[in-house]
Amino acid sequence: MSELTSPTDQRDADTIVDIKNTYKISKVDWQGDPCVPEEYAWGGLGCSPSINNSNTRVTSLNLSVSRLTGRIATSFSQLTELESLDLSGNDLTGEVPEFLVELPNLRILNLSGNKLTGSIPKGLKDKSDLDMRLDDNPGLCLTDPCKKHKFVIPLIASASALLAVVILVSLGMWVFKMKGLKVKFTKHESSKLRKRAFSYSIVLDITNNLQNLIGEGGFGKVYLGTLKNDNTQVAVKLLSPSSVQGDKEFRSEVELLMVVHHRHLVSLIGYCEKRGARALIYEYMANGDLRRHLSGNHGDSLKWNDRLQIALDAACGLDYLHNGCKPAIVHRDLKTTNILLDENMEAKIADFGLSRAFANDIDSHVSTRPAGTIGYLDPEFQNSGNLTKGSDIYSFEIILLELITGKPAAKRRADNTLTLLLHWVTPKVESKDIQSIVDPRLQGQYNVDSAWKFLDIAVSCTAPSAVQRPDITQVVVELRDCLGMEIRMGRTSDNPNSSSSMDMSTGQFDSQLSALSAR
C-alpha cells in the first residue's frame, strides 16, 4: 500500500466529523486529520490515496461495539470510496437504509448485533459482490417476501457460519497486518515526518527558482508555486536564517500542522528541512489576506454579508483549535493578515508559527517570549505574561472590530503616537453612534440590527479578565444568529438602510450596553 502523503479529502473529513458528532463518539484518538499521518490515523478508519486527485480517501470504517444508538445516519452515504463498513454490536434501530445501495465500492457491510427492523433493500440483496452480515437483529426480516417464520433460522445459521469464517480470515489478516506494521514502524520510527518532505531542489522547481514573491514578513518570504504532478498552486513559506524559529520549534510546528485539519484552517501540504533551508508548503489562498480587502487601498470593499460570513468562517476555525483539538491549541497571533481567503472568499486561519498545544484546560496558558501583534495583544497577557484561549478571544474581537469599521487594529499618527482601534471605538459605542462606527465604504448598505448585534458580540470579548470572556463556541452561535438575522431581514448589499430599523435597534441596545458596563 502506498504511503499517505496528502490530507484527507475535505468531504470525507467533514463527513467523519459529522458522524462523530451525530453519535457523540468520544474516542481519544479521533482528533486532527482522520487519515494522515498514518500512525496517528483515527481508530477504526482505513484510508488510501485517491486515484483521481491528490487527497486521501476513507475506504473502510469500523465502528463495531461503539455504543451507537438511533438510526443509521445518512452521513455514511457521503463516504463514496467506502469499501467496508462495520457497525456491528451496537444499538442501532430503524430499517436498513436504501442509501447504502448507492455506495459504489462497498464490498463488506456488517450490521449484525443491532436492533434493526423491517426488510432488506432489494438493491443490497442484488449486489452479488457484497458480503452482507445481518444476523442477531431480531426484528429484521431476512426473507423475501417477508415471512418471519419461514427460512429465518437456516438463514441466520448460515449467516452465523459465514460470520465465523470471516472473523477467522479477518483475524489472520489483522495479525499479518500488525506484524507488517511492527516491522515498518521499527524501521521508520525516527522519521515519521518524511512522508511530506520536499527536497530543496523540488522547492526551487515548484517555485520556478523563487521567481514569484507574494508575501514577506519577519519569518521570511512567501512564494507562489505549482506542484508538477497535478498543477495545484501552493504557497511556499521560506524561513529566513534570522527567523526566531529554531530547528526544534520548526519540527514542532510541522508535527502540529500534520494532524490539524479543518475546512477553515489553511492546510499544510509539505515541508522542507535541509541544512540552511526550512520551508513550509501550504495550500494557496487566491484572494490573499483579510486586511488587504479591508484596506482603503483595495478597490472593492467587502459587502456586509461577506464580512459576516468571513467572521463566522474564522470563528469556526478557532473553535476547532480551542475545542475540537485535544489538547487545545492557542493560536497566539490572530490578526486580519492571518485570515486568508480562497477563490470562493471562504476564510481560513493561517500562520501557526506561534501556536501552542496545552495538555488540559488547567494548564492552558504559557509564559514565554513576547508573542502576538500590537493592537491585538490581550492586556491581561501584558500584565501576567500568560497567553490563554481568552487571549485568542481578545484578538478575535479586534478582528471583528476591523470587519465592522474597516480600520486597522493600530495606526501610527504623524507624531509617531499609536492609536488603537479599541480606544477609538469605545466612546462611540457608549454614545450608541452606530453610523460613525460602521465602515463608510458600505454606504449604508447593511441592516442596523445585525450591525448592533455584531458590535455587541465584539464588545463582549473585551472583558478585562480572560475568564470573563465568552468561549469561542458561544461566539460562533452568536455570529450564526447575526448572519441569520441579516438573511431573514432580506437585507442584501443592494437594499437601502431603514431609519425605523435604526430606531428600534438603538432602543434595544440600551439594555445590552448596560449589561456590558456592569461586567
Image (cartoon, rainbow, N blue to C red):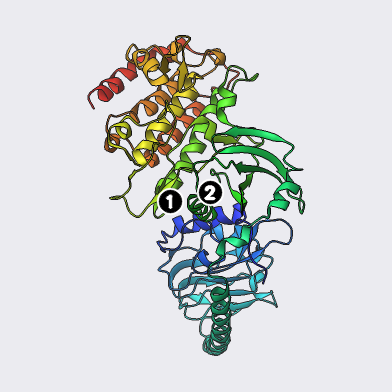
> Picture quarter containing residue 340?
top right
Asked whether residue 150 is in view, the answer is: no
State the CA–CA distance, disc 1 to disc 2: 10 Å
Q: Position of residue 504 (x, y in %)?
A: 38, 15
Left or right of residue 298, residue 141 in this image: left
Left or right of residue 81, residue 165 in this image: left
Q: What is the number of the mark on residue 324?
A: 1
Q: Position of residue 422 (x, y in %)?
A: 38, 21
Check disc 2 and report the residue beneath it: 262
Instruction: Give the mark nearer the N terminus: 1 vs 2.
Output: 2
Q: Position of residue 488 (x, y in %)?
A: 50, 28
Q: Taking 505 as reference, is 343 above or below it?
A: below
Q: Nearer the viewer, residue 444 or 123?
A: 444
| Residue drawn at (61%, 62%) of the image | 194
Asked whether residue 229 is in view, the answer is: yes
Q: Secondary structure at mark 1?
A: helix
Residue type marked 2 = His
Residue type marked 1 = Gly
Q: Quadrant of the N terminus?
A: bottom right
